[in-house]
Amino acid sequence: MSSSLAAAEVMGMGSPSHGLVFDIMKYATHDGPGIRTVVFFKGCRLRCRWCHNPEGQRAWPEIMFWDRRCTGCGRCLAACQHGALAGGNGAFRLPNDKCVLCGACVEACPAEARTLVGRTLTAEQVMDEIGKDAIFYEQSGGGVTFSGGEPLAQAAFLMAVLRMCKCEGYHTTVETTGFTDVKTLLKAGELTDLFLYDVKLMNSQVHRKFTGVSNASMLANLRALSRHHGNVVVRVPVIPGVTDTAQNLRELGEFLSGLDGVSEVHLLPYHRHGMDKYSRLGRPFLMGAVLPPDAGTMRRIAEQLTLFGKRVSIGGSPDR
Amino acid sequence: MNARVALLREQSLSTQPSIASERAELLTRFYLQQGEKVSTPVQRALAFRFVLENQPVYVGQDELIVGERGPGPKATPTYPELCCHSLQDLDLLATRDKIRFEVPDRVKRVYRETIIPYWQGKSLREMIFREMSDAWKAAYDAGVFTEFMEQRAPGHTVLDDKIYRRGLLGLKEDIRKALDELDYLHDPECYARREELRAMAICIDAVIGFAHRHAAKARELAQRENDPGRKRELERIAEICSRVPAHPPTDFWEALQAYWFVHLGVIIELNTWDAFSPGRLDQHLYPFYRKGLADGTLTVERAKELLQCLWIKFNNQPAPPKVGVTAAESGTYVDFANINLGGLRRDGADGVNELTYLILEIIDDMRLTQPNTSILLSQKNLDRFLGAACRIIRKGWGQPAVFNCDAIIAELLRQGKTLEDARDGGASGCVETGAFGKESYILTGYYNLAKVLELALNNGFDPRKGIQLGPTTGDVREFETYEELFDAFRKQLLHFVDIKIKGNNLIERMFATHMPAPFLSTLISDCIAKGRDYHDGGARYNTTYIQGVGLGTVTDSLSAIKHHVFCKKTLTMDELLNALLDNFEGCEEVRQLLLNKTPRYGNDDDRADSIMRAVFEAFHTSVDGRPNTKGGVYRINLLPTTCHIYFGSVTGATPEGRKAGKPLSEGISPVQGADRRGPTAVLLSASKMDHARTGGTLLNQKFSPQLLEGESGLNRLADLIRTYFRLGGHHIQFNVVSAGTLRAAQDEPERYRDLIVRVAGYSDYFCNLHKDLQDEIIARTEHASPDG
C-alpha cells in the first residue's frame, strides 16, 4: 500500500457528503433493538488485538483474498495494469505496494476470491440502502446502527447520515469506542437514540498494550456522554486473560456505577470468527490459541458486574 | 402424552407401511360380478358400497378414534381403476431403500392372478396415455411438465363445517329434495343429474354402513373385554359409531369420529391427490369443545387425548405409492393432509380460540409428519397466536407453516369467491388456496420453467433428448437484444402451456365421464344442488392449477444472459451456449463468473427482481383465466413439492451457473446460495411478485437454531413473518438447519452461501468461517435446544 494513496483516501474522511464504508449488513439483530441495518465505517485508530473486524481498521480500501474460493485461473494477474500481483510466491494473492486499488483484479476474478473492502459512498447511497429495509424497522422497532471501524472517525459523514435518518424517523444507534473529542461525541449524541459504547480495560497502560492507544479520553468521554445522554449501553468484550481479570472487572464496575446515563452492560464473549479475515488481509492473527470463554465464566462475570448496580446481559441486545 | 397415546403413536411410527390388496380385490370382484347395466356414477357408488361392506374392519387396542383405510394401520390399499401396479412395481416397492412398502406374497399372487389380468388396459392411466397427443407425450417425456392425474384422482379437497352441522343423513335429505325437484320436462340433463344424485345417496348409505360395522366390531370386542375401563370405552365407541357420521355429532368425541369416517370415505372412494383435509379444525370443533367443558362431559386432558388419537389416524395412512417408472423414485409417505388453524371466522372476526392453542400444543407433542399443520395469520390475530406458533417453528421439526390469511382472502376474492367463502378458505396440500367445502381446485402438474428457457436457448431443440421439441423461435446467437431472447422464452412457454391445457381438458373430461366421485361430491357445495359430480363442475367454484417450478433458476439465468451477453458483453452468446452444452467442463471460470457476477434474485436488487416479475407475468398471462371444462378457469401457483429435483434432472446446465441435472430453485425461493444479503432482502425480493394473482406461492427460509434463541430471536422471527405478510407474501416456511445441512455446506459452499449462523452476539455467513469454527458450530447445533 503506497502511503500517498492512503493519504488520498483519507482526505475524504472529513467530508459530510462522502464516507468510506466497508459493509452494510441487513437483518442485524444484536446491535440495538429490533431488526436493524448496520453500516460499517472503515477506519479506526485502535488496534485491539482481538478485533473481529480487522478490515475496519485501516482508513483506506483494501484487497481481501479468499483462499478457498480461488480457482487459480490467473485472470487477476492478467487484469492488473500495475504489476501489483507480479512475482514471488502466491502471485495471485495479495498485492504488493504497486497496488493503486483500482479494483481491476477484483472485477476480473470470477470466483469472488478477491474483494475490495471499503467503498466511498455518498450519504444518499447509504440512505438508499438503509431505506430498503424501512418496513422491517417499523415492524420490529428496529432501525440503523453505525459501527465500524469507528464511525466517529468520519464524524462529518456520520452526522450527515444521522440527520437524514432522523428525518426518516429511523431509530439510530452508534457503536463506538469513544475515541474522539468530546464535542464531536456530544454533538453526535443529539442525533443518536442509543449508544453502544465499548469499554475494554481500565488500566491505561494495559489498554495501550492491547489496543495501541490510551483509554484516558475514552473514559472521560463516556463520563461526559453519560451526563448528557440517557441511553448508553456499555459493551465489554470478555477477552480471556485480558479484560476478565478480577481487578479490571472491579475497576470497571466501580467506574460504571457512577455513570447515570449508562443503562446497562453487555458482555460480549471473545470469539474467533474474525480469524480468517486476518489471513485474507495478509496480516498476522495475534490471538493464537486463545479460546472463547465458556458459559460458566460468562455467567460468573455477569454476576460480578451486576453487584455494581447495572443490568448486565451476555451477548447482544436484550429485546425491546 | 399419556400412556395410551404414546403406545398408539409408537405403533404408528414403527409399523412398516405395506400394500393391502383387499380394496383392489373387492373392486375387481364387483366388476366381474356386476349384473344389470347401470349408469357410471351408480356403478361407481355400488362398487364403493361393496368395498365398504366387505373390507376388513379394524378396531385397535386402546384406540379411541377408529377406522383405517386398509385392513390396519399403515396397510395401504391400491386403486387399480386409476393405475394398476405391475409385478415389477410391487417388487420395486418391496425392495427399494427409501419409502419402502412391504408386499406380502399373497398380495403378489392376487395381483398376478386376478387384479392385473382384469385391469390391464382398463385403468384410467392407460386410457390417458392412449388419448394424449404425440406433442403432449414428447413434452411429458422430456420433463417439460408432469401430469398429476395419470396416477391419482383429482382431489385436493378440504371440508367446511357441514358434516358437523348436518350429518350425512342431513345431506341425504338434500339429495332427496334435489331428486324430487328434477325437471324431467325441460332439463335435458335430468338423467345425468338423477344418476349422480342416486349415486350420492348410495355412497352416503355406504359410509354410514361402514361406521355401523365399526360399531358392531366394537360391541363384539366389548363383550370379550375383561378390563372394565376398556369395556366401557368400547361400548362408547360402539354408541358413537352408531350415531355418526349419520347424525350431527353431539359432543367432541363424536365430532372427531364423524370427521374420521368421512375422511376414510373420501380416500377409499378414490386415491385423491393430497388426501383430504378437515380444514379449519379449531373452528369446527370449538362448539363441541366449549359445550363439553361447560357441561362437564369433557376435560382439557380428554380433548387433548382424543385429538392426539385423531392425529395418529392421519399418520396411519401413507400416501399410496405410484406405478411405472416413478415407482423407483422414492417419493414420500406424506399424503399432504393439512389442518388450518387461526385466521378469520366467516363473519370476519378473529378466528383464534382456546382450541387453536391446544392443537398447537398437540402438534408439538406428537411431532408427526401427518397431518401437516398450518397457521393462517391475519392482521387481526394477536401476536400471542403468532408467538405460540413461532415457539414450535424454532424447534426445527418443520411445522407449522405460516400462511397469510389476508392474502389468501385477497386471492380468493380476485378469483370471484364471495367474501364469506373466501374467509372460510385457507391453504391445503402444500400452499394452495381454496374455498373450503365449496371448491374443486385441482392441481394438474408441475411446469418446468427452466426447461422452457433451455428450449428457447436452443431454438426449440432439446439437447438431452436430441429432438426438436418446441417451435423454432430463432437462433439466439443472432439476437441483438435481450428482448428478443425474452420473447423467444415467452413463445416457448405459451406453446407448452397450450399443450398441457389441451391434455388437461381431455383428462378432466375422462374423470368426469369415467371416474365420478359421488361420495366426495356430497361433501362439496353445490354438487347436490346442481346434481353434478365434483369432477364435472358440480362444486360452487372450479379452478384448475398449473404449478410453475424454477422461478429463481430462470430469473438468474435470464439475468446472467442480460448482464454478461447483452450489457457488459463479458461473454458472447456462442461462448455461453457452448459452456452450457459442455456442462461447464473446462470452463469453470465462466461458471464462477455467472454464479458470482450476476445480479441475482433474492437480494432486493431490482435488476434481477424485475426479471423475476417479467417471468411471473409471462407465466401468469399464459395460464390465468383460460377456461377449463368445468365452468371454471386455469390459474397458476408457484410451488415445487420435490419436483424441482426431478425437473433439475432433465434440464441441462443453465446460464446462472447451475450444472446439468442439479436441482432447480424451489418455489419462489432464490436459487440455493444466491441470496447473500440476508432474510430481509429475500422477503423484499419475493414480495415484488403479485402474490394475489396466484393460488399460492412457497417460500423457504433457512435459519440456524442459534438465530432463533431467546425471546429476542422469537420476536425477530415474528417480525419477519408479519412484515412479509404486510408486503403481501402468501406463505413462508422456516427450516431450522440441522448439523447435517451445515456439513453439506462445508462440502458444497457455493450452494449454501446464504446460510447465516449466530454465536453469542454475532452472526456471520457460515461458509465464510474457518473450518475449525464451522466444526465447532456443527457440534453445537447437534446439541442445540433453542427453547431457552
Image: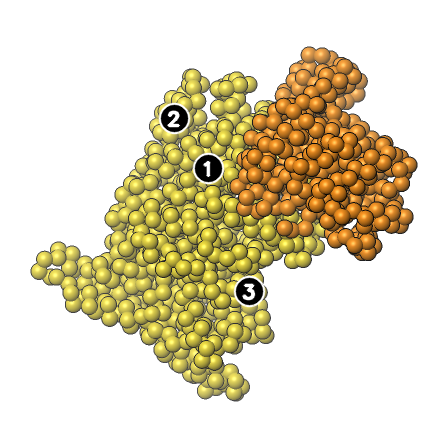
Q: Are marks 1 and 3 in contact (CB under 8 Å)?
A: no
Residue position for label 3: B361
Residue position for label 2: B488
**CA distance for labels 3 and 2:** 52 Å
Give amino acid for label 3.
Answer: Glu
**CA distance for labels 1 and 2:** 24 Å
Quarter containing the C terminus of chain B: bottom right
In percent of the image, x 45 and y 40: which residue is there? B549
Residue position for label 1: B688
* Chain letter, colour orange: A
In percent of the image, x 42 and y 48: which residue is there? B407
Q: Residue B365 at x, y = what percent?
A: 57, 65
Q: Residue B652 at x, y = what percent?
A: 49, 32
Discs 3, 2: same chain: yes
**CA distance for labels 1 and 3:** 35 Å
In-image side of B141 versus A45 (left or right): left
In percent of the image, x 56 and y 51: which residue is there? B718
Q: Residue A35 at x, y = what percent?
A: 60, 44
Give the mark, 3 or 2, whose residue is nearer the N terminus: 3
Q: Is residue B293 visible?
A: yes
Q: Nearer the viewer, mark 3 or mark 2?
A: 3
Q: Are marks 1 and 2 in contact (CB under 8 Å)?
A: no
Give amino acid for label 1.
Answer: Lys
- Find residue A66 and report its image quarter: top right
What subunit carries mark 1?
Answer: B
Query: In this structure image, what is the colour of chain B?
Result: yellow
In percent of the image, x 82 and y 53: which residue is there? A308
Give amino acid for label 2.
Answer: Ala
What subunit carries mark 3?
Answer: B
What subunit carries mark 2?
Answer: B
- Find residue A85 and report its image quarter: top right
Discs 1, 2: same chain: yes
